[in-house]
């Protein structure tokens, strides 16, 4: 998967530090050079993105929403 363009300006590259899985939603902690960013995303998305500890990701921050894109 390659991201060609995205309209979110606040992007933080990092690695997944911790995943707290729930039945429906999960918390994903991303360690960035500026600190930890936490995203709450569906557990299905965690599985679809094949996120594991150490996965390289980009945290995309827009207002109060944090999305994750796997690199």
Image: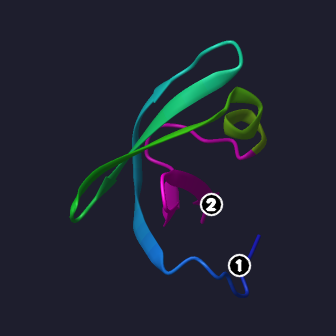
> Split into 4 quadrants, where in the image is the C terminus?
bottom right
Picture residue at 67% right of the left edge, 37% below the top = 46
SS class of the residue under badge 1?
Answer: loop
Residue 58 in magenta stretch:
yes
Where is 65 relative to 2, above or below? Answer: above
SS class of the residue under badge 2?
Answer: strand
Residue 31 percent across, percent down from the top left = 31, 51
Residues under numbered marks 1 and 2 in contact, where contact means CB atoms less than 8 Å apart: yes
Q: Pointer 2: what residue?
A: 69
- Judging from the image, the colouring scheme is rainbow
Residue 70 percent across, percent down from the top left = 62, 59
Q: CA distance from mark 1 to mark 2?
A: 9 Å
Q: Residues within 10 Å of mark 1 (few under 14, many from 20)?
A: few
Looking at this rendering, what residue extends furthest in the left direction?
34
| Disc on the earlier residue, 1 or 2 | 1
Picture residue at 57% right of the left edge, 76% below the top = 8
Instruction: Give the magenta part as a residue range.
Output: 49-71
Q: Residues within 10 Å of mark 2 (few under 14, many from 20)?
A: some
Where is 22 relative to 55, above or below? Answer: above
Residue 66 in magenta stretch:
yes
Where is 57 relative to 44, above or below? Answer: below
Picture residue at 49% right of the left edge, 58% below the top = 56
Residue 22's mark?
A: none
Looking at this rendering, what residue extends furthest in the front direction?
63
Count numbered badges in the picture. Answer: 2
Q: Pointer 1: what residue?
A: 3
Most foreground residue, 67 or 1? 67
> Split into 4 quadrants, where in the image is the N terminus?
bottom right
Residue 33 percent across, percent down from the top left = 23, 65
> Is 36 left, or right, of 62 in this rendering?
left
Looking at this rendering, what residue extends furthest in the bottom direction?
5
Residue 61 percent across, percent down from the top left = 48, 63
């Amino acid at each position: 998967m390659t991201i060609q363009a995205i309209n979110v300006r606040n992007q933080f590259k990092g690695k997944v530090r911790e995943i707290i899985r729930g039945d429906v939603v999960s918390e994903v902690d991303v360690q960035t050079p500026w600190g930890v960013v936490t995203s709450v995303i569906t557990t299905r998305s965690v599985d679809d993105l094949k996120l594991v500890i150490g996965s390289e990701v980009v945290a995309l921050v827009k207002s109060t929403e944090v999305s994750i894109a796997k690199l």
